[in-house]
Image (spheres, rainbow, N blue to C red):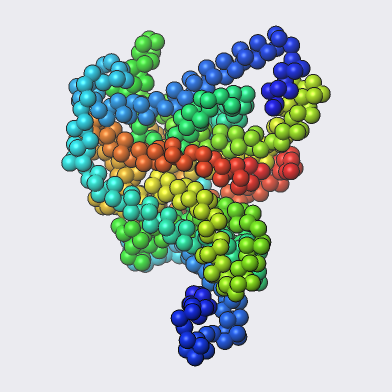
Amino acid sequence: MATLPATTQGAEASPIVSAHTRPTARWYQLREKATPYLLIAPLIALILLFIYWPLVYQTYLSFFDWNFVRPDMTWVGLDNYTRLADDPRFIRSLDGTWKYFVTLIPIQVFVPLGIAMLLWPIRKSKAQRGYQLMLFSPTVIAYSVGAFLWLWIFNPYYGVLNKVLEVFGIDAIKWLSDRDYAIWAIIIVATWKTLGFHLLLYMAALEAVPNDVVEAAQLDGASNWQIMRSIRFPLISPTFFFIMVTTVISVNDDVFGAINVMTEGGPFESTTNIIYYLYQQGFEYFQIGSAAALSVLLFIATLFLTWIQFRFGERHVHYG
Amino acid sequence: MASVASTSVSSPSSRSSERFGKIGAHAIVLILCFLTVFPFAWMLSTAVKEADQVFTQGWNLIPESLRWANFSDAFSFFPVANWLWNSLGISALTTAGKILISVPAAYAFSRVEFTGRKFFFAFVLATMIVPGVVTTVPNYVMVSKLGWMDTWTGVILPSLPGTAFYVFLLRQNIMTLPQELVDAGRVDGASTVRILIDLIVPNIKPTIAVITILSFLGAWNQYLWPLLILSDFESKTLATGMPFFTANQEAAQMWGPMMATATIAVLPPLVIYAIFQKQIINTFVNSGIKG
């Protein structure tokens, strides 16, 4: 319908025919008014159906005891929520969630910043493109496939890691079935997988720092380190803040693929986290009500964490 | 020009320490690169090794002899051809769908005046703070009630609205276009939709290209959602099918064909990224995500 005015402009249309088919000015106006809503309609409809409605629907589901196959659902009120506190598996999953937080947030936020600062003085070198290509490569592949590659490296009998350690006189480690080591295996994979993306964001931010400010400081005799600390770092603080916020939200989500492929939460639930617990409740034990309750709590927790960071973190950020 | 300024004020000794620092930086970065790339190198090496070399006690990266049959074995032992087809089809359709719903919306949010524009844009952006995993349970129940289990539709449709970031990127790009472009179209009597198709889209092709790449990579690498929806062994994608090797006792002995399959799974994203690295980075640099 949108093509009508264009076709009526065609020279081959006779004046009489076009007088009949040309939309009236009123109709044209009406259509122009409706157009923006039609342009956003598919997106808005899909968002409503698959993002916002599910948030409502799962709140509803969280008040029922339901195993997905049974046709009848039993109303249990807040039981799905209160029962969590008594579930030792839930408590252990919180423990794992915390461990991923305290290890992976510093690793994913600060290590790429350090590497970006390291790369900065040599950014003009010819090798730079190659470095970026290599450091970024794990980011573009599937988490599950990446974890699968590491599964082979961590293999206790034929894995290359244990073979290398043997050279240094270290006995074979059962990386994935020893509860002291398994979580470190996941952390190694998660670090390998995500370092490149944050590095790229930091590099882009450093690149965007205006040159005149830096030159003025150089004329005043500031050292490279002083410039990095007092000029470049404050100016890239929005990127730092962005990475901090997104890492806090996504870090436990991200390791799901690695946990699922490498350890399935074991051994003795030492590598499980809240996301994996949710997955097991919902799709291994089909405790839909319990999984829904957990989703609700998780959503609230995410909102809260994001709010806290904006409330207390953003004041240290220099936009502009 | 920054280097000119610094050499003019620094003494010879600090210049040599700077050079030493640069060599040190190269060395550290090279070690990091080696650690990063090693899993891929080891994958390739295993993918072309004879079985007896795979299970040897040594750790030679370069195989003594090449065995390309691991690749054909992968296709005959596992439904790798099906997985490849599913990965390609689902990724292509998801990408096309996301572009088709995102471009018109981004245009409306940036260049068309209408009541509620701010509200709807916020409505879209707010989806970014809803973690994907949070909607998994209700969407799973919905998809199964709609009878979409084990179908491409069941995988694709619910993942289409996860496109807020792309809408944001597109909007940023469209806003940089000169207003005269739209005004010129208006003077010629073009409708809102005509302006989008004839004037806007041709001018934002580079951003559309980058979004196509990012969206394709995202769909190709998707894990949890297709894992839940595609339960038939044959209907899986490469990313969701491969981990099942480890659950299979027989397969657990076939690291050669398994790493050949992994090679097939990682090659498309790596090649696409290697080709478009510059455009992808530029999009991030220009998007304002830097701050």
Query: What percent of the width, then of the height, locates residue A6?
Result: 51, 75
In the image, is residue A76 above or below residue A109? below
Image-quadrant location for residue B239: top left
Q: Can residue A231 be spotted in the picture?
A: no
Point 52% across, 43% down: residue = B279
Is A188 left or right of B121, judged from the image as shown? left
Is A63 left or right of A232, judged from the image as shown? left
Is B250 left or right of B9, judged from the image as shown? left
In the image, is residue A10 above or below residue A130? below
Point 28% across, 27% down: residue = B46
Q: Quadrant of the N terminus of chain B?
A: top right
Q: Quadrant of the C terminus of chain B?
A: top right
Front residue of A304 and B259: B259
Point 33% across, 50% down: residue = B88
Image-quadrant location for residue A109: top right
Is B35 left or right of B81, judged from the image as shown? right
In the image, is residue B36 above or below residue B247? above
Front residue of A240 and B137: A240
Query: What percent of the width, then of the height, locates residue B115?
Result: 66, 72
Point 74% across, 43% down: residue = A320
Q: Can residue A42 be spotted in the picture?
A: yes
Seen as rendered, the residue at the extreme right is A220
Query: What percent of the width, then of the height, locates residue B170?
Result: 56, 55
Front residue of A75 and A319: A319
Count of marks placed on residues? 0
Query: What percent of the width, then of the height, locates residue A128?
Result: 53, 27
